[in-house]
Image (cartoon, helix red, strand yellow):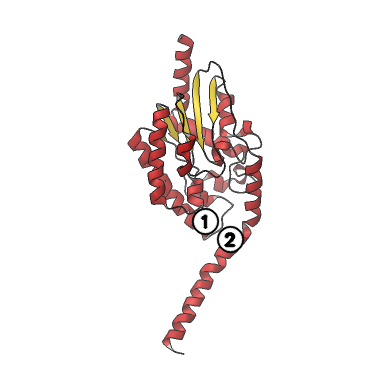
Amino acid sequence: MSSSVRLSARKLLLWGAVAAPLLLALGCTVGRMRESAEMARASEPLQRPLRDPAARLLIVGDSTAVGTGASSPQASLAGLLARAYPGLHIENRGRDGATFAELAQQLDGDAPFDMVLIQAGGNDVIRLRDLDRTAVEIDHVIRRARERAEFVVVMPAGNVGNAPFFFAPVSWVMTARARRLHAQVRASALRHGAVYVNLFKEKQNDPFAQHSELNARDGLHPSDQGYRVWLDALSAQSGFEQRLAALTASSHDR
């Protein structure tokens, strides 16, 4: 056998070793892709307009801002915030499928807000978007959010590579990309005076990888219980409760 033939044979074997698990992973997620699309079509962002609120919150982002995966809008993160803070006005502009490139449009307008919550990043990771370009978009979005409110919180989805939706080796790629995106968000938040909430965890430490009930039936979005875990992280890392308490106290003094 000539050296060129042996080389071609080795390339063919290598391609088969890489392609087979990739095709298997993609094939195993077809049903979940349909499930995820159906859940997105059925989801709607929770809104709560109040005439004289203690504080005004603007939510922008992707399906996690909408609350896809929750059993109802009230069980989404926005719904949990509404339940916990009765005086909180909530305008939710989240849209299923949105990337950071689309969030600037969601931030349009001049009406003042006390807080902006940004929930995005998962689609930038999953769609294999150029993360160098995404880093520029993240900067632009956070700068624009800071123009809408003094207090801005950025909370990207966690380690999407740990989601049951993905199988190795695709899951490894998704973990690497999610890790990089979180680093970009952290750095941008620091530059622009926003608060970064870290949901990224390695698999051995990720409750979403250890407890299946935290994942919705599509294996990609949080369930009701999963959104409660996110609320706990938001409360613990952002100072959200303290900021709302201060705003509520000042509204009572007026």
Would you say residue 155 is visible in this rendering? Answer: no
Residue hosting label 2: 25
Asked if the residues shown at circle 1 and circle 2 are in contact, with their CB atoms under 8 angstroms apart, the answer is: yes
Q: Amino acid at mark 1?
A: Ser
> Which element type, helix, strand or loop, lies under badge 2?
helix
Mark closer to the chain start, 1 or 2: 2
| Residue 135, percent from left and from top | 39, 46
| Residue 143, percent from left and from top | 38, 35
Q: Amino acid at mark 2?
A: Ala
Rendered residue at 54%/26% (across/down): 90
Residue hosting label 1: 171
Rendered residue at 48%/11% (across/down): 252
Q: Is residue 196 above or below residue 248?
A: below
Label 1 to label 2, Cα distance in Å?
A: 9 Å
How dense is the environment of label 1, judged by Cα within 10 Å: few (below 14), some, or many (20 and up)? some
Q: Is residue 184 above or below residue 17?
A: above
| Residue 228, percent from left and from top | 57, 34
